[in-house]
Image: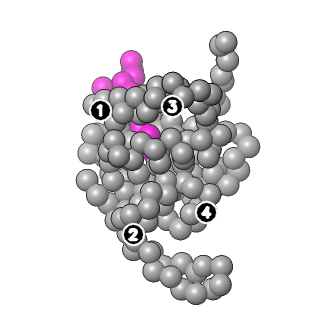
Amino acid sequence: MHTQAHLDYKDAACNLLSVSISARTASNRDIPVILGLLYDLGRPRPKEDKEVDIFRKMVKKYIADDDKQILVAALDEIKLVGMAAVMFLPRLNRTTTELYIPELIVSENYRGRGAGRMLIKECIRIANKKKCHRIRLESGNSRGESHKFYSDAGFEQSALSFTMSIK
């Protein structure tokens, strides 16, 4: 499925520009850009060449998994500027799944132009189609702008997240 919106925004020179942002399901050809977006957000980079291949295979497997999906946001249907990874998680106390978003990333140079809104809109469409009972995501404590974006999109803070690093 391809969701598209036409957006107008002012660039740095205050010229009105017309752009089209679309969201679609990722394909294997998108893997290098997906990995680049993850690295831009501060996710671990490969330390040696064999890790690059491992990361590519992990994304390829994610794309092929029926319980997972990666969406990409494209500017004018050409340049990938964002991505959202989604997982459909069963819960022990629910008869429907939850759509969980472990990563939602928009390239820093393209934030505020509608790519994130388009990805959220597509996640909502998919959640409704799959009859999920909710959409859940997490955002790092220091990402205040992201928190405002999620709140403006209709999300509410409903829990705290605790992690433990295992070496």
Q: Secondary structure at mark 3?
A: helix
Which quadrant of the view contains residue 69? top left
Q: Where are the magenta residues, as a range?
A: 84-97
Q: What residue does disc 1 label? A: 64
For image coordinates 32% across by 60% down, the residue present is 3
For image coordinates 51% across by 24% down, the residue present is 50
Q: Earlier in the sequence, mark 4 or mark 3?
A: 3
Nearer-the-camera pick, 12 or 123: 12
The reply, left or right, for residue 3 in relation to residue 13 is left
Q: What residue does disc 2 label? A: 76
Residue furthest to the top in view is 167
Q: Are marks 2 and 4 in contact (CB under 8 Å)?
A: no
**Residue 109 bears which disc, if any?**
4
For image coordinates 39% across by 18% down, the residue present is 92
Q: Earlier in the sequence, mark 1 or mark 4?
A: 1
The crowd level at tag 4 (other Cα within 10 Å; few <14, some 14-19, many 20+) is few
Q: Position of residue 113 (x, y in %)?
A: 53, 68
Q: Position of residue 161 (x, y in %)?
A: 63, 28
